[in-house]
Amino acid sequence: MAVIDVALAGRPYRVVIEEGVLARLPEAAAPFLRGYGGRRGVPFVADTNTHRNFAAGIDSALAEAGFVAEWFVVEPGEDAKTWGVLERLTDWLLGLGVTRRDHVFALGGGVVGDLVGFACAILKRGVGFVQLPTTLLAQVDSSVGGKTAINTRAGKNLIGAFHQPSLVLIDPLVLASLPAREMRAGFAEVLKYGLLGDAGFFAWLESHGNKVLAREPHALEHAIATSIAMKARIVAEDERETEDRRALLNLGHTFGHALEAETGFSDRLLHGEAVALGMVLAAGYSARRGEISSADAERAARAIAAAGLPSELSALGLGCDGAALVDHMRHDKKAEGTTLPFLLLRALGRAYVARDVDLADIAAFLDGELSA
Ligand code: GLY
């Protein structure tokens, strides 16, 4: 078991990583269930998969403690992060009589967490919520830090708010039913923490990554706890990404978002897979600038390939050129006029924000990678 505090001034909260914590939810989340009971059901939001896999267990744990869960269930996937679903969800919460003292429970991956977090940010100008992340990606990244959003026709996560959860309960046991491909995609974000800020952790992942992917309990808990400890520290230092600190968490994301956009944000390339390849490109581009050695860039790519993640841009068969990928980057919400901050490496385990990157040079670099 590990407990990590996100030390935000005036709004600290706890992340609990513990096998079986979902089964003892009434005790683990006791302060956030006050006010429910009697005829007042506890609002839970899930997708059809997490509802099918975990709702019965939660229902019975709550029943034993004298609570009843009310469920709002969405379809799995990004289509749940729309104005339409947001409207139905907020109407449902208002219909339940949720007050500003209440908490809503989000049981799912990043989509459910982002949707519920944003609904709670705007409902009555701010209602509390508890994250119960069920994918590795949500457990090590999106459930912590308070970035909440929905998508619009213009792009992903363009409508949102910073709204921190009141508690995050991470149960590694829920990963038993996670498809191997999604496990690998979440592992990309774990590797990200090593590459951006902890060379020792990166080396540990090189030798123990297979155990994490096999869901070996000790390795998995160590990987999740180390990732969250770093994220908690960074979020506490720079909650709103204004100090070039939280931006470090975007390592691999600028290249990655361009690849996701080019592949239509589809199952062809999952977010974590795009981030993995994005990190290979960030390392390769850092080597091109002479900031890390080619050997280190190759070492990063090898660790990513060893996890079964995409590590070669040419293998994607994109059929576009580097300029087309750069064009997607120009629409990134981090774009600043005609330029874009890039997360690059000074060493494995030491990322930094580069603001002097020439997009024409990025396009030329990508042309080389596309045809390698
Ligand atoms: N996923 C990046 C962040 O939370 O800032």
Image (spheres, rainbow, N blue to C red):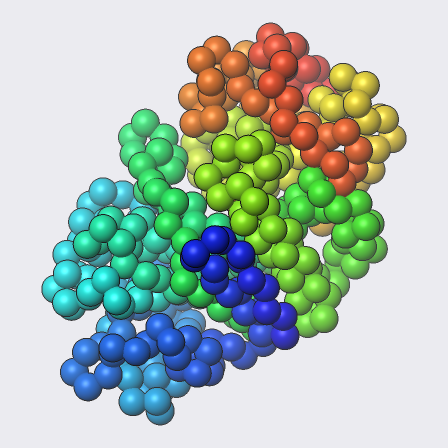
Residue 19 in the image: above or below residue 180: below
Residue ID at (65%, 10%): 361
Q: How far across and how far down the image is residue 324, in percent? A: 51, 15
Residue 56 in the image: above or below residue 4: below
Tell me where residue 219 sits by quadrant: bottom right
Task: Give the camera-side residue of 104 and 316.
Answer: 104
Task: Give the camera-side residue of 11 and 201.
Answer: 11
Task: Give the camera-side residue of 20 and 308.
Answer: 20
Q: In this view, does 131 lie to the left or right of 37?
A: right
Could you tell me which quadrant the N terminus lies in?
Answer: bottom right
Residue ID at (38%, 76%): 31
Residue 249 in the image: above or below residue 325: below
Tell me where residue 359 sits by quadrant: top right
**Residue 295 visible here:** yes
Q: How far across and how far down the image is residue 47, in percent? A: 35, 60
**Residue 305 visible here:** no
Q: In this view, does 292 lie to the left or right of 171?
A: right
Q: In the displayed image of the protein, which residue is found farthest to the front?
A: 10
Task: Give the camera-side residue of 104 and 190.
Answer: 104
Tell me where residue 151 sits by quadrant: top left
Q: How far across and how far down the image is residue 369, in percent? A: 69, 20
Residue 117 in the image: above or below residue 346: below
Could you tell me which quadrant the C terminus lies in?
Answer: top right
